[in-house]
Image (spheres, rainbow, N blue to C red):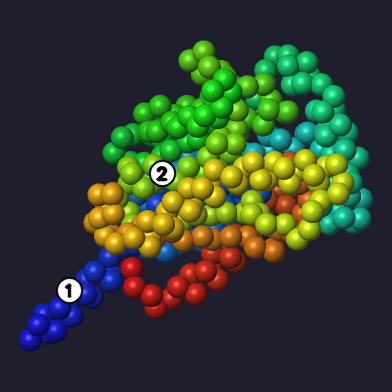
């Protein structure tokens, strides 16, 4: 008798949309991989509780929140595509733009491209305060063009958390709905060798990836969804120690961008192993799911993070969609 009463209830629970939160890494144009992951995930029957992002992850997060507020999952998918189209169109004239010969010789890897080598050498010889005295930051224009800030800042929408790095204190600065604007998004994606620090309320900020790539704790403490989907494409491991100068610098940057996330992940995994109600944080344990790029993005080279060609962004989007699809198939049949 009890089983017959429970079965309809279980069917109702399983038919409800899955509620989840999202943690989105940054990494320049490699963030188009996350676009693909989200594009595939948004085809599922889900509800998003909160999104935390840094750098390109913050832009993806803002697009998802803004688009969802306008027209649900389909609105989010449209906003993500518009974001990356605008990025490609706005940044297509950079000195690192490749030639057809670059592609024929190295595929999508641009580490030996003359344009990238010139830009890389230039940014190590002179600061952006000398090269760009006006302080122009194209991310500001992109954010103002793509996002409806009033819609993005609604307190009744999806919770949005944007990571920035306070240059003076070296600490994480987190902005939430109600305090997001184009400068905040530009600050979250501000690479210090390319752009001047973005000043907000008299304080300078750099890329949020240095201190939270992305920050997980607001999804734990300020959101109610049990499941957290972490989209991760910055490699935690490398096959061998780099030897070329550019490779050494790139790997050191990857380690720095990964360090804080690694510590937060360890904390979440410790929570997963504890009993319900540990420290009074929740009545159940959080579940952290990682969707990683794996080996599919190896060999692209550090320079490809500056490649905003539409064909390359679509290539990364398709990789992200495929990884998300494979992950979902692997999860088929598991309970919520």
The residue drawn where x is 83% and y is 57% is 107
Name the one closer to the observer, 310 or 269. 269
The residue drawn where x is 25% and y is 55% is 277
Q: Which quadrant is home to the N terminus?
A: bottom left
Q: Secondary structure at mark 2?
A: helix
Left or right of 97? Residue 167 is left
Name the one closer to the observer, 158 or 280. 280
* Number of other residues with Cα within 10 Å of mark 2, as a class: few under 14, some 14 to 19, many 20 or more: some
Q: Position of residue 280 (x, y in %)?
A: 25, 49
Q: Quadrant of residue 135?
A: top right
Left or right of 49? Residue 319 is right
Marks 1 and 2 sit apart, C-alpha to C-alpha, by 33 Å
Q: Position of residue 250 (x, y in %)?
A: 75, 43
Q: Is residue 125 visible?
A: yes
The residue drawn where x is 54% and y is 23% is 169
User: For mark 2, what is the residue?
Assistant: 217
Q: Quadrant of residue 113?
A: top right
Name the one closer to the observer, 255 or 97. 255
Q: Earlier in the sequence, mark 1 or mark 2?
A: 1
* Number of other residues with Cα within 10 Å of mark 1, as a class: few under 14, some 14 to 19, many 20 or more: few
């Amino acid at each position: 008798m009890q089983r017959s009463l429970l079965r309809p209830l279980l069917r109702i629970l399983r038919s409800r949309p899955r509620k989840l939160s999202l943690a989105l890494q940054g990494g320049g144009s490699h963030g188009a991989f996350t676009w693909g992951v989200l594009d595939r995930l948004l085809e599922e029957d889900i509800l998003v509780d909160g999104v935390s992002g840094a750098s390109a992850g913050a832009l993806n997060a803002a697009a998802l929140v803004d688009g969802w507020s306008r027209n649900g999952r389909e609105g989010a998918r449209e906003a993500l595509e518009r974001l990356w189209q605008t990025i490609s169109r706005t940044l297509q004239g950079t000195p690192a733009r490749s030639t057809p010969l670059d592609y024929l010789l190295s595929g999508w890897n641009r580490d030996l491209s003359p344009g990238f080598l010139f830009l890389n050498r230039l940014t190590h010889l002179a600061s952006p305060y000398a090269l760009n005295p006006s302080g122009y930051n194209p991310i500001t224009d992109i954010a103002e063009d793509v996002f409806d800030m009033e819609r993005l800042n609604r307190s009744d929408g999806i919770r949005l958390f944007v990571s920035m790095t306070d240059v003076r204190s070296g600490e994480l600065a987190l902005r939430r709905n109600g305090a997001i604007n184009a400068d905040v998004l530009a600050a979250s994606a501000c690479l210090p060798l390319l752009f001047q620090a973005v000043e907000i309320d008299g304080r300078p900020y750099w890329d949020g990836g240095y201190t939270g790539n992305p920050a997980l704790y607001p999804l734990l403490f300020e959101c109610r969804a049990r499941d957290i989907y972490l989209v991760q494409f910055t490699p935690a491991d490398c096959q061998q120690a780099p030897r070329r100068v550019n490779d050494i610098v790139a790997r050191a940057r990857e380690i720095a961008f990964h360090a804080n996330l690694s510590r937060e992940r360890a904390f979440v995994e410790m929570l997963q192993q504890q009993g319900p109600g540990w420290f009074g944080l929740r009545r159940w344990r959080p579940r952290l799911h990682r969707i990683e790029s794996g080996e599919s993005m190896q060999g692209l080279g550090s320079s490809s993070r500056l490649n905003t060609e539409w064909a390359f962004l679509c290539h990364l989007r398709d990789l992200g969609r495929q990884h998300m699809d494979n992950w979902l198939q692997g999860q088929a049949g598991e309970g919520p």
